[in-house]
Amino acid sequence: MKIYKILSLLLLLYLVALPRFNWRPLPAPLNNFVGTKPFDVEQYEKYVEYFRGNLQIASELEGPFSYRPLVPYLASFLHFDALTSINLINLLLLSLGLIYLIKFLSEINVSEKFITIGLIIFIVSFPVFYYTTSGYIDASLIGILAITNYYLFRSKYFSFSISFTIGILIKETIIIMLPVAAVYYLTNEKTNKKYLKIIVPIFLYLITVIAIRSLVPQKENYIWNPSIENFLYNISRAKTYLTFILTLGIPGVLSLYLIFSDKKKNVSKGLLFPLVTGFLFSFLLWVYSLFSAYSDGRQLWTSYAYTIPLMLELYNSMYINYPLRR
Protein backbone atom coordinates (compact mmCIF):
# COMPACT_ATOMS: atom_id res chain seq x y z
CA MET A 1 0.00 0.00 0.00
CA LYS A 2 1.31 3.44 -0.93
CA ILE A 3 2.46 5.72 1.85
CA TYR A 4 -0.17 8.39 1.18
CA LYS A 5 -2.96 5.84 1.70
CA ILE A 6 -1.43 4.69 4.98
CA LEU A 7 -1.11 8.31 6.12
CA SER A 8 -4.74 8.93 5.13
CA LEU A 9 -5.87 5.95 7.23
CA LEU A 10 -3.82 7.17 10.19
CA LEU A 11 -5.33 10.64 9.84
CA LEU A 12 -8.79 9.06 9.87
CA LEU A 13 -7.83 7.19 13.04
CA TYR A 14 -6.87 10.44 14.77
CA LEU A 15 -10.07 12.17 13.65
CA VAL A 16 -12.23 9.34 14.98
CA ALA A 17 -10.37 9.23 18.30
CA LEU A 18 -10.23 13.01 18.81
CA PRO A 19 -13.76 13.66 20.19
CA ARG A 20 -13.05 11.52 23.28
CA PHE A 21 -9.48 12.74 23.81
CA ASN A 22 -8.72 13.11 27.54
CA TRP A 23 -12.26 12.14 28.52
CA ARG A 24 -13.64 15.16 26.68
CA PRO A 25 -17.38 15.63 27.39
CA LEU A 26 -19.82 14.49 24.72
CA PRO A 27 -23.17 16.20 23.95
CA ALA A 28 -25.46 16.21 26.99
CA PRO A 29 -27.61 13.11 26.34
CA LEU A 30 -24.58 10.97 25.50
CA ASN A 31 -22.47 12.37 28.31
CA ASN A 32 -25.11 11.33 30.84
CA PHE A 33 -24.70 7.78 29.61
CA VAL A 34 -20.89 7.90 29.74
CA GLY A 35 -20.55 8.97 33.37
CA THR A 36 -17.46 10.23 35.17
CA LYS A 37 -13.81 9.33 34.71
CA PRO A 38 -13.33 5.67 35.73
CA PHE A 39 -11.15 4.47 38.60
CA ASP A 40 -9.02 2.58 36.05
CA VAL A 41 -8.01 5.79 34.30
CA GLU A 42 -7.23 7.55 37.57
CA GLN A 43 -4.96 4.66 38.53
CA TYR A 44 -3.05 4.87 35.25
CA GLU A 45 -2.60 8.62 35.74
CA LYS A 46 -1.17 8.03 39.21
CA TYR A 47 1.14 5.38 37.79
CA VAL A 48 2.55 7.92 35.33
CA GLU A 49 3.24 10.31 38.21
CA TYR A 50 4.92 7.49 40.13
CA PHE A 51 7.29 6.86 37.22
CA ARG A 52 7.98 10.60 37.09
CA GLY A 53 9.43 10.41 40.58
CA ASN A 54 6.45 10.88 42.88
CA LEU A 55 7.24 7.76 44.92
CA GLN A 56 4.85 8.67 47.74
CA ILE A 57 1.96 7.90 45.42
CA ALA A 58 2.93 4.21 45.51
CA SER A 59 0.57 3.69 48.47
CA GLU A 60 -2.35 4.69 46.23
CA LEU A 61 -1.60 2.24 43.42
CA GLU A 62 -3.68 -0.92 43.22
CA GLY A 63 -3.68 -4.10 41.21
CA PRO A 64 -4.57 -5.11 38.57
CA PHE A 65 -3.74 -1.62 37.25
CA SER A 66 -0.24 -1.62 38.71
CA TYR A 67 0.38 -4.94 36.92
CA ARG A 68 0.28 -3.01 33.62
CA PRO A 69 3.39 -0.83 33.84
CA LEU A 70 4.57 -0.27 30.27
CA VAL A 71 2.13 2.35 28.98
CA PRO A 72 2.38 4.54 32.13
CA TYR A 73 6.17 4.12 32.07
CA LEU A 74 6.44 5.25 28.44
CA ALA A 75 3.97 8.06 29.10
CA SER A 76 6.14 9.33 31.96
CA PHE A 77 8.80 10.47 29.45
CA LEU A 78 6.40 12.82 27.65
CA HIS A 79 6.22 16.45 28.76
CA PHE A 80 2.44 16.58 29.05
CA ASP A 81 -0.01 15.90 31.83
CA ALA A 82 -0.45 12.23 32.69
CA LEU A 83 -3.73 11.67 30.85
CA THR A 84 -2.55 13.35 27.65
CA SER A 85 0.69 11.34 27.75
CA ILE A 86 -1.17 8.04 28.15
CA ASN A 87 -3.44 8.83 25.23
CA LEU A 88 -0.53 9.82 23.00
CA ILE A 89 1.15 6.47 23.73
CA ASN A 90 -2.17 4.76 22.94
CA LEU A 91 -2.34 6.53 19.58
CA LEU A 92 1.27 5.67 18.81
CA LEU A 93 0.94 1.95 19.55
CA LEU A 94 -2.44 1.65 17.84
CA SER A 95 -0.99 3.40 14.77
CA LEU A 96 1.89 0.91 14.69
CA GLY A 97 -0.62 -1.91 15.08
CA LEU A 98 -2.62 -0.67 12.09
CA ILE A 99 0.52 -0.57 9.96
CA TYR A 100 1.30 -4.15 10.95
CA LEU A 101 -2.30 -5.17 10.26
CA ILE A 102 -1.89 -3.79 6.74
CA LYS A 103 1.33 -5.82 6.37
CA PHE A 104 -0.42 -8.94 7.68
CA LEU A 105 -3.37 -8.58 5.31
CA SER A 106 -0.98 -8.05 2.40
CA GLU A 107 0.92 -11.22 3.34
CA ILE A 108 -2.27 -13.29 3.13
CA ASN A 109 -2.99 -11.85 -0.32
CA VAL A 110 -5.85 -9.50 0.47
CA SER A 111 -6.19 -6.95 -2.31
CA GLU A 112 -5.34 -3.34 -1.54
CA LYS A 113 -8.96 -2.37 -2.12
CA PHE A 114 -10.22 -4.78 0.51
CA ILE A 115 -7.40 -3.86 2.91
CA THR A 116 -8.57 -0.26 2.68
CA ILE A 117 -12.18 -1.28 3.31
CA GLY A 118 -11.17 -3.43 6.26
CA LEU A 119 -9.05 -0.70 7.84
CA ILE A 120 -11.80 1.89 7.45
CA ILE A 121 -14.25 -0.47 9.18
CA PHE A 122 -11.66 -1.02 11.92
CA ILE A 123 -11.11 2.70 12.41
CA VAL A 124 -14.67 4.00 12.08
CA SER A 125 -15.87 1.80 14.91
CA PHE A 126 -17.25 2.22 18.40
CA PRO A 127 -14.19 0.97 20.32
CA VAL A 128 -11.74 3.19 18.41
CA PHE A 129 -13.98 6.20 19.02
CA TYR A 130 -14.89 5.41 22.62
CA TYR A 131 -11.78 3.83 24.16
CA THR A 132 -8.66 4.88 22.24
CA THR A 133 -7.97 8.24 23.88
CA SER A 134 -10.13 8.08 27.00
CA GLY A 135 -7.24 7.07 29.27
CA TYR A 136 -7.66 3.32 29.18
CA ILE A 137 -4.65 1.36 27.90
CA ASP A 138 -6.59 -1.09 25.72
CA ALA A 139 -5.69 0.73 22.49
CA SER A 140 -2.02 -0.01 23.21
CA LEU A 141 -2.94 -3.65 23.78
CA ILE A 142 -4.74 -3.82 20.42
CA GLY A 143 -1.68 -2.33 18.74
CA ILE A 144 0.78 -4.83 20.21
CA LEU A 145 -1.70 -7.65 19.54
CA ALA A 146 -1.72 -6.79 15.83
CA ILE A 147 2.08 -6.69 15.79
CA THR A 148 2.33 -10.03 17.62
CA ASN A 149 -0.14 -11.63 15.21
CA TYR A 150 1.92 -10.47 12.25
CA TYR A 151 5.09 -12.10 13.57
CA LEU A 152 3.20 -15.27 14.49
CA PHE A 153 1.68 -15.74 11.04
CA ARG A 154 4.97 -14.83 9.39
CA SER A 155 6.68 -17.56 11.46
CA LYS A 156 9.19 -15.07 12.90
CA TYR A 157 9.42 -16.81 16.26
CA PHE A 158 11.97 -14.58 17.99
CA SER A 159 10.13 -11.38 17.02
CA PHE A 160 6.85 -13.00 18.05
CA SER A 161 8.28 -13.85 21.47
CA ILE A 162 9.62 -10.32 22.01
CA SER A 163 6.36 -8.70 20.91
CA PHE A 164 4.33 -11.08 23.09
CA THR A 165 6.47 -10.27 26.13
CA ILE A 166 6.02 -6.55 25.51
CA GLY A 167 2.28 -7.22 25.38
CA ILE A 168 2.38 -8.82 28.84
CA LEU A 169 3.92 -5.61 30.19
CA ILE A 170 1.03 -3.65 28.66
CA LYS A 171 -1.89 -5.79 29.86
CA GLU A 172 -2.28 -9.37 31.01
CA THR A 173 -5.14 -10.06 28.57
CA ILE A 174 -2.52 -10.60 25.86
CA ILE A 175 -2.93 -14.15 27.22
CA ILE A 176 -5.37 -14.81 24.37
CA MET A 177 -2.30 -15.10 22.13
CA LEU A 178 -1.37 -18.38 23.84
CA PRO A 179 -4.25 -20.46 22.40
CA VAL A 180 -3.93 -18.63 19.06
CA ALA A 181 -0.24 -19.52 18.86
CA ALA A 182 -0.92 -23.10 19.94
CA VAL A 183 -3.50 -23.60 17.19
CA TYR A 184 -1.27 -21.89 14.65
CA TYR A 185 1.69 -24.18 15.34
CA LEU A 186 -0.47 -27.31 15.52
CA THR A 187 -1.96 -26.59 12.09
CA ASN A 188 1.11 -25.16 10.35
CA GLU A 189 4.25 -26.62 11.92
CA LYS A 190 5.19 -30.07 10.60
CA THR A 191 8.03 -30.91 12.99
CA ASN A 192 8.05 -31.77 16.69
CA LYS A 193 9.49 -28.31 17.35
CA LYS A 194 5.89 -27.10 17.38
CA TYR A 195 5.46 -28.37 20.95
CA LEU A 196 8.46 -26.38 22.14
CA LYS A 197 7.16 -23.32 20.30
CA ILE A 198 3.85 -23.71 22.14
CA ILE A 199 5.40 -24.23 25.57
CA VAL A 200 7.94 -21.37 25.52
CA PRO A 201 5.35 -18.53 25.35
CA ILE A 202 3.47 -20.11 28.26
CA PHE A 203 6.62 -19.96 30.39
CA LEU A 204 7.32 -16.43 29.16
CA TYR A 205 3.86 -15.38 30.27
CA LEU A 206 4.10 -17.00 33.71
CA ILE A 207 7.61 -15.71 34.43
CA THR A 208 6.79 -12.17 33.29
CA VAL A 209 3.52 -12.02 35.24
CA ILE A 210 5.20 -13.30 38.41
CA ALA A 211 8.04 -10.80 38.01
CA ILE A 212 5.65 -7.91 37.49
CA ARG A 213 3.54 -8.77 40.53
CA SER A 214 6.65 -9.15 42.66
CA LEU A 215 8.26 -5.86 41.66
CA VAL A 216 5.56 -3.26 41.04
CA PRO A 217 4.17 -0.97 43.76
CA GLN A 218 0.68 -1.79 44.95
CA LYS A 219 -1.60 -1.20 47.88
CA GLU A 220 -3.19 -4.62 47.64
CA ASN A 221 -2.85 -7.80 45.62
CA TYR A 222 -6.05 -7.77 43.61
CA ILE A 223 -7.29 -10.77 41.63
CA TRP A 224 -10.37 -10.82 39.45
CA ASN A 225 -12.48 -13.20 41.51
CA PRO A 226 -15.58 -14.34 39.63
CA SER A 227 -18.80 -13.97 41.58
CA ILE A 228 -22.53 -14.23 41.02
CA GLU A 229 -22.89 -10.71 42.42
CA ASN A 230 -20.70 -9.30 39.63
CA PHE A 231 -22.61 -11.29 37.05
CA LEU A 232 -26.01 -10.08 38.27
CA TYR A 233 -24.73 -6.51 38.36
CA ASN A 234 -23.37 -6.66 34.80
CA ILE A 235 -26.44 -8.25 33.25
CA SER A 236 -28.61 -5.56 34.87
CA ARG A 237 -26.72 -2.78 33.04
CA ALA A 238 -27.88 -1.60 29.63
CA LYS A 239 -24.30 -0.48 28.93
CA THR A 240 -23.12 -4.10 29.11
CA TYR A 241 -25.28 -5.10 26.15
CA LEU A 242 -24.91 -1.88 24.18
CA THR A 243 -21.11 -1.80 24.29
CA PHE A 244 -20.95 -5.52 23.43
CA ILE A 245 -23.14 -5.10 20.35
CA LEU A 246 -21.37 -1.94 19.20
CA THR A 247 -17.93 -3.48 19.68
CA LEU A 248 -18.85 -6.75 17.97
CA GLY A 249 -19.86 -4.58 15.04
CA ILE A 250 -19.65 -5.40 11.36
CA PRO A 251 -16.40 -7.43 11.66
CA GLY A 252 -17.87 -9.71 14.31
CA VAL A 253 -21.17 -10.28 12.52
CA LEU A 254 -19.53 -11.05 9.17
CA SER A 255 -16.97 -13.30 10.86
CA LEU A 256 -19.78 -15.30 12.45
CA TYR A 257 -21.41 -15.62 9.05
CA LEU A 258 -18.17 -16.95 7.58
CA ILE A 259 -17.66 -19.41 10.44
CA PHE A 260 -21.15 -20.88 10.20
CA SER A 261 -21.43 -20.93 6.41
CA ASP A 262 -19.90 -23.01 3.64
CA LYS A 263 -17.69 -20.04 2.73
CA LYS A 264 -15.16 -21.17 5.33
CA LYS A 265 -14.25 -24.09 3.04
CA ASN A 266 -12.47 -21.56 0.82
CA VAL A 267 -10.08 -20.62 3.62
CA SER A 268 -7.00 -22.65 4.47
CA LYS A 269 -7.17 -24.31 7.89
CA GLY A 270 -3.75 -22.92 8.75
CA LEU A 271 -5.23 -19.43 8.57
CA LEU A 272 -8.86 -20.02 9.55
CA PHE A 273 -8.35 -22.01 12.75
CA PRO A 274 -5.97 -19.56 14.52
CA LEU A 275 -8.16 -16.58 13.56
CA VAL A 276 -11.31 -18.28 14.83
CA THR A 277 -9.44 -19.20 18.02
CA GLY A 278 -8.57 -15.54 18.60
CA PHE A 279 -12.19 -14.53 18.04
CA LEU A 280 -13.43 -17.26 20.39
CA PHE A 281 -11.05 -16.42 23.22
CA SER A 282 -11.79 -12.70 22.89
CA PHE A 283 -15.45 -13.59 23.38
CA LEU A 284 -14.60 -15.82 26.35
CA LEU A 285 -12.61 -12.95 27.85
CA TRP A 286 -15.74 -10.83 27.66
CA VAL A 287 -17.84 -13.63 29.22
CA TYR A 288 -15.31 -13.91 32.06
CA SER A 289 -15.57 -10.16 32.63
CA LEU A 290 -19.30 -10.57 33.27
CA PHE A 291 -18.44 -12.53 36.40
CA SER A 292 -15.29 -10.76 37.50
CA ALA A 293 -15.14 -7.09 36.47
CA TYR A 294 -17.00 -4.07 35.18
CA SER A 295 -17.90 -5.54 31.81
CA ASP A 296 -17.98 -3.48 28.63
CA GLY A 297 -16.81 -3.61 25.03
CA ARG A 298 -13.12 -3.25 25.86
CA GLN A 299 -12.85 -6.96 26.66
CA LEU A 300 -14.17 -7.82 23.18
CA TRP A 301 -12.09 -5.26 21.29
CA THR A 302 -9.21 -7.74 21.06
CA SER A 303 -11.36 -9.70 18.59
CA TYR A 304 -10.68 -7.08 15.89
CA ALA A 305 -7.20 -8.49 15.36
CA TYR A 306 -8.98 -11.64 14.13
CA THR A 307 -12.39 -10.56 12.86
CA ILE A 308 -10.99 -8.02 10.39
CA PRO A 309 -9.01 -10.76 8.54
CA LEU A 310 -11.98 -13.15 8.82
CA MET A 311 -14.32 -10.51 7.41
CA LEU A 312 -11.96 -9.93 4.48
CA GLU A 313 -11.78 -13.68 3.88
CA LEU A 314 -15.54 -13.55 3.44
CA TYR A 315 -15.31 -10.60 1.04
CA ASN A 316 -12.69 -12.42 -0.98
CA SER A 317 -14.80 -15.55 -1.14
CA MET A 318 -17.93 -13.69 -2.23
CA TYR A 319 -16.57 -11.09 -4.63
CA ILE A 320 -13.25 -12.31 -5.96
CA ASN A 321 -14.10 -16.00 -5.96
CA TYR A 322 -10.71 -17.30 -4.88
CA PRO A 323 -9.45 -18.17 -1.40
CA LEU A 324 -6.89 -16.18 0.48
CA ARG A 325 -3.60 -17.94 0.99
CA ARG A 326 -1.17 -17.94 3.86
Image (tube, helix red, strand yellow):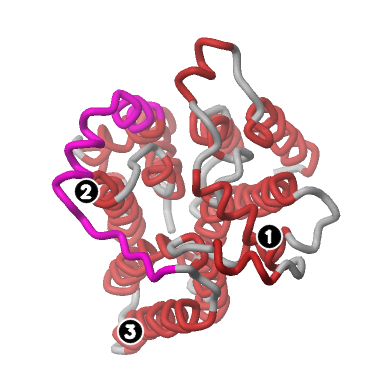
Q: Residue, x 66% and y 28% (percent of image)?
A: 24
Furthest residue toward right? 79
Mark 3 or mark 1, which is nearer the start of the sequence? 1
Element assignment for label 3: helix
270 to the left or right of 62: left
Of residues 167 and 321, which is closer to you in this image? 167
Quadrant in which residue 263 is drawn: top left
Among all residues in the image, which is located at the extreme left? 228
Q: Position of residue 190 (x, y in %)?
A: 31, 80
**Distance Cα–Cα, label 1 vs label 3:** 34 Å
Q: Is residue 150 above or below residue 252?
A: below
Left of 194 or right of it: where is 50?
right
**x and y percentages locating residue 161 in the rendered image:** 50, 77
According to the picture, the residue beneath numbered tag 2 turns out to be 291
Q: What is the magenta range?
A: 220-246
Q: Identify the residue under disc 3.
A: 199
Q: CA distance from mark 1 to mark 2?
A: 29 Å
Q: Which residue is mark 1?
A: 48
